[in-house]
Image (spheres, helix red, strand yellow):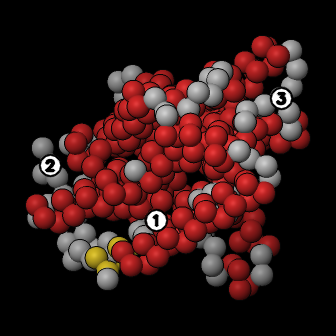
Amino acid sequence: MTMHSARQGLPFNLRRSLIGLLVYAGFLLLAFVLLRGQGANLARAQNAISQANLALLGLALGAELLRFGCMGLLLWALAAALGVRTPLLRAIRVMLIAVAARHLVPLGGIPDYALRARFLQRRGAPASTVAAYFLLNGVLSWLALISIFGLGFVGYVALNHGLPPQPGLFGGAALGSLGVLALLAWLWHGQRSAGHVLGWLHYLKLRAPAWLRKRLVSPERAMPFVDELRSSLRTVQSARGGPIALVALAMVPPLADVAALAAVFAALGLPVRLAAMLLGYGLAAYLAFLTPLPGDAGVVEAALTLVFTSLGYDLGLVAAGVLLFRLLSFWLPIPIGLLLWWGFEAEGVALAQPEPQA
């Protein structure tokens, strides 16, 4: 059972995706068995879920819906800053489909990167603009993640007058964050960075074996693309609000995710400490970025459970809270994205249809 749009050219293998989701659910059941083996009080966790504060769970749901909307708003804002016009609601709908696709990537779904790239290309964006979008989106995502982790780390140290437990894990994440910041600062110097990259490419072309030289792009062919990419980045710098507004907007989705996590923990009666929430979420998201597993399936759950149990939270309640949180942040976008996908098809609205140029 494969969904395919001739207009959009985007395959969606529903059967493989559903099978993959069932496998993922099986792994979650296995995790419950392992938690019981580790002495987790699952009966207490079950009681906590049945007696959870529904108002706080509703607040968590609202925070996640805000996150999804702001992700679409960021897509729209970046596209507008790069000179690509698109309706805001369309960008939000496409981003929701992309989030669902991202969660289905290891299970046979369409890659969200391909969907967003096609979305921009069909609105007249050249390859350099699409590359600039993904570059900026990646930079903003890393800056938001590092900011959240850094605030949590500094807040925890200030409140507890010491480093958090698992110093190797947290220390490695802190050093990695500093390394990423240094790399981003280096890349921000567009002229110099482009020159270095093209210089390395030229060196490889001269020194590499013949079989590799044939597969390397020559600096002469890459230079026009790099010039167009730098031009797109300068367009963003000169846009209204500039990079500061985009950084502020990029901070909203992960902060909404942290708010949802805190609301779920509060609904289960777990203590909510802001520094711990920021630290735990930041480390889990950091590991999810670095994991080789597509869709970060299982990594966030394991990281959140490890972090909060090491901070003194009850293992059974943490497992229940993490699974409820992931139900909202990971599973909820999948049916929403599928419904929006079918909505596009039912309305006869093609993602591939270019916007009229003014």
**Rendered image quadrant of residue 272:** top right
Is residue 261 left or right of 335 when viewed as pictured? right
The percent coordinates of residue 105 (x first, y second) are 49, 67
Cα separation between marks 2 and 3: 54 Å
Whether residue 18 is visible, yes or no, is yes
55 or 166: which is nearer to us? 55
Cα separation between marks 2 and 1: 34 Å
Is residue 273 left or right of 37 when viewed as pictured? left
| Label at residue 356 | none
315 or 24: which is nearer to us? 315
Total count of labels:
3
Which amino acid type is marked by label 2?
A: Gln
39 or 337: which is nearer to us? 39
Q: Which quadrant is the N terminus positioned in?
A: bottom left
**Rendered image quadrant of residue 109:** bottom left
| Label at residue 357 | 2
Which amino acid type is marked by label 3?
A: Pro
127 or 288: which is nearer to us? 288
Residue at which label 1 appears? 104
Residue at which label 3 appears? 164
For residue 8, above or below residue 238: below
Asked whether disc 2 touches disc 3, contact meaning CB atoms under 8 Å apart, the reply is no
For residue 29, above or below residue 258: below
Q: For numbered disc 1, what is the local secondary structure?
A: helix
Earlier in the chain: of badge 2 and badge 1, it is 1
**Rendered image quadrant of residue 223:** bottom right
The percent coordinates of residue 76 (x first, y second) are 32, 40
Residue located 80% across and 52% down the image: 38
